[in-house]
Image (cartoon, rainbow, N blue to C red):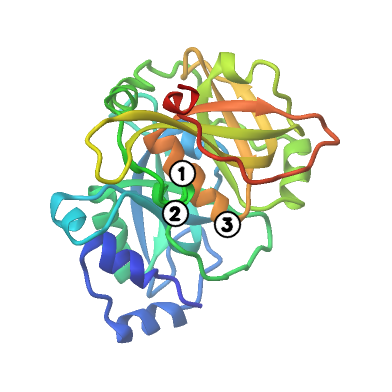
Amino acid sequence: MKRFRDAFVVAALGLALQPAWAQQAAQMPRGLEKSPQAPYRGISLTFDRDRVFYLSPDDRVDVIAVVEKTPESAAAGNEDGATTLLKHVRVLAVRPSETSPGKSVVHLAVAPLEAQYLEVAAHQGSLWLSLRKKGDVEDHPLEMATWRKALKSEFHALLSPRVRQRQEEEIAAPCNRVIAEGGSAGASILADVESRMRESYPALSVSIASDKVLFVQPGDRIDVLATIDARRPKSSKTIGVTQTLLQNILVLDNRKLEFLPGRNILLIAMNYDEVQYAALAWDTAEIQILSRDKADRDTYPIQPATLDKLQ
């Protein structure tokens, strides 16, 4: 199983992957114990608690890296993007952070080379963990998710300053609840959530303003709108662009939590490509949710919307 995305390493991180190392990492068997089995190592990574709220020891996750372009990489034609960096990684433990309120520490079993790529990706951008359903061993190849692809190359995306500010201020309140030993949220996933999880694609845990999901229930289907600042090629004018990025997405759970005042946590199930676009959008865009009729499963292409198209 090829675990690393060569294109991501070259384009986003600027590193060359050694084929012998990649083959060695791919051949290492995963251990069954709650501690890293040789030749694996345990690495502790800190996440916003909403991103890992549903994780427990022995879960399997994919690691999605959202990496921002640097001036050097932009000059080479690279852009912001999200890619699945590692697949089928075992969760060893999940604990609340002792130093950062609103954060959780996830202990993962990885090969030594994998640890290096995780660390450099975390410093270059941000990491997401996509929860796999039990027994899922799918490993089909994935292309990097970028705004240029999502917007059909019509716009060049810019990271909005308001998004940066929200990311810095989010999850600032301390958590007053007791966190149980088995997971980051103090309880296992509800039985009905587990049932839907077994029948679903991988799931991503995300936070969103409570008002936007006030009428969304577990089991509903939703569409996800993403609004970014962008400009057209050969133009210096910045405009707002809204794109229906995801359609017909299953909501596994929706709950309000005291450590996220005014925000809810959604556990949403998507296919592997959609997970990458969701991570990219939640990191770099303003999100809005559209609810669907339970019988409505239709999806179709929708062009991006800008105010200048109304003039």
Q: Residue at x 81, y 37 (%)?
A: 296
Label of residue 279 in the image = 1
User: Which one is earlier in the sequence, the residue at label 1 or at label 2?
Assistant: 2
Mark 1 to mark 2: distance in Å?
9 Å
Residue farthest toward the left in the current orientation of the protein: 72
Image location (x, y in percent) of residue 78: 27, 58
User: Which one is earlier in the sequence, the residue at label 3 or at label 1?
Assistant: 3
Badge 1 vs badge 2, beta-carbon distance below 8 Å: yes
Image location (x, y in percent) of residue 172: 34, 18
Image location (x, y in percent) of residue 58: 57, 55
Q: Position of 7 compared to 55: left or right?
A: left
Q: Label 2 sits on what residue type? A: Ala
Q: Which of the 4 image quadrants contains residue 35?
A: bottom left
Q: Which residue is mark 2?
A: 145
Label of residue 294 in the image = none
Image location (x, y in percent) of residue 80: 32, 49
Q: Label 3 sits on what residue type? A: Tyr
Q: Position of 55 compared to 38: left or right?
A: right
Q: Residue at x 21, y 65 (%)?
A: 14
Mark 3 to mark 1: distance in Å?
11 Å
Q: Which of the 4 image quadrants contains residue 108?
A: bottom left
Total count of labels:
3
What crowding class fits label 3: few (fewer than 14 Cα within 10 Å), some (14-19), or many (20 or more)?
some
- Secondary structure, mark 1, is helix
Viewer-side residue, 295 vs 269? 295
Q: Label 1 sits on what residue type? A: Ala
Q: Which residue is mark 3?
A: 272
Residue farthest toward the right in the current orientation of the protein: 295
What crowding class fits label 1: few (fewer than 14 Cα within 10 Å), some (14-19), or many (20 or more)?
many
Q: Residue at x 32, y 84 (%)?
A: 19
